Image (tube, helix red, strand yellow):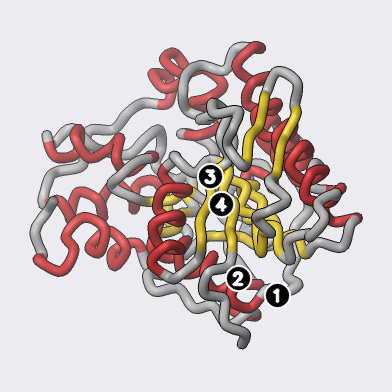
Amino acid sequence: MPDQTGRNILITGASGMIGSALGSMLTTAGYQVHALSRVKRDSPFYYQQSSKHLILDPAVPLYAVINLAGVNLAAGRWSAACKAEILESRVQLTHALATSIAAAPVRPELFLSASAIGYYGPTGSTTATENSPPGNDFLAGVAQQWEQATAPAENAGINTIHLRFGVVLSKRGGMLQQLLLPYKLGLGGPVGTGDQYLSWISIADVEKIVLALLRENPQSGPLNLVAQPVTNADFSAQLGNTLDRPSFLRLPALVVRLLFGEMGEALLLGSNRVTSIKLPALGIPLDYPSLAAALRNILLGSRGQVT
């Protein structure tokens, strides 16, 4: 394996939960990490959203690009304007980025571009893998267009891997962080029937997978970043057990629909049972394949106390 110390990595969405974790980890691993700016015009890597113009500094040859940009799906009810922003924030930047790196004097060797397991649509109790067809709901359409936007990079011969993220668990952001306070107060519990499946992954395993992909640069195509799926009821029970708190206050589906509309229907009541057949094939075992182990690591750490 060639020495990759000092290689330049560009991250879009670098200030988000996943981007900040990856930036810190990759810096520790010896990479030179750069963030795409939307504010500083004199930044070596700059994106002007209004004109869809993206600038890459030719003096900083990139080994890889990690594209994580996109507005939060759960920021509010999905009005027509909100749904348009969800789609455009992903597709427009991704296409501009793919076009720019394809035209760079020195092209990056690897393009890791975020997608989501929403690609498969609601799966119910049926298990989807990387070989499963796409769904036909709103989130599936977003994921498909998001992935198609990388075409300029793929056509230029840049190895492109679509990272189809499950729900990423971290106490520094995302779903788990939002649940901690109500669960610590004893107000947690299943949503709806609790039978719907949740496909998740620990932030520590996201870091491990990305580092392995950067080091090995495999030709893998789309890759599901998920561990062992659990039902919503099982997730609720295990989170309550980890925090040593009760978890029986069920949130009825009717209330979810009234409060959150289509967003709640898709993100809270929808069932996504997704696994990966490619991670084992790539020889990337998860450190936290079970939810119990992941929650203990995230919430208790080495001291065995909730932090």
Looking at the rendered structure, the kind of residue marked 4 is: Phe
Is there a contact, CB below 8 Å, between mark 4 and mark 1? no
Judge whether 285 appears above or below 116 on screen. below
Residue 218, label in figure: 1
Is there a contact, CB below 8 Å, between mark 3 and mark 2? no
**Residue located farthest toward the right when viewing the structure as drawn:** 155
Q: Image point 44% across, 45% down: which residue?
A: 195
How busy is the neighbourhood of tag 3: few (under 14 within 10 Å), some, or many (20 plus)?
many
Residue 213, label in figure: 2
Residue 28 visible in the displayed image: yes
For the residue labelled by badge 3, is the local secondary structure a helix, a strand or a loop? strand
For the residue labelled by badge 4, is the local secondary structure a helix, a strand or a loop? strand
Distance between the alpha carbons at the discs numbered 2 and 1: 7 Å
Is there a contact, CB below 8 Å, between mark 3 and mark 4? no
Q: Nearer the viewer, residue 55 or 173?
A: 55
Q: Nearer the viewer, residue 26 or 121?
A: 26
How busy is the neighbourhood of tag 1: few (under 14 within 10 Å), some, or many (20 plus)?
some
How busy is the neighbourhood of tag 2: few (under 14 within 10 Å), some, or many (20 plus)?
some
Judge whether 234 appears above or below 149 on screen. below
Is there a contact, CB below 8 Å, between mark 2 and mark 1? yes
**Residue located farthest toward the bottom when viewing the structure as drawn:** 1
The x, y position of residue 221, in whole percent, is 75, 64
Is there a contact, CB below 8 Å, between mark 3 and mark 1? no
Q: Image point 79% across, 47% down: which residue?
A: 150
Q: Image point 47% across, 48% down: which residue?
A: 19
For the residue labelled by badge 2, is the local secondary structure a helix, a strand or a loop? helix
The residue indicated by pointer 3 is 35
The residue indicated by pointer 4 is 165
The x, y position of residue 29, in whole percent, is 43, 70
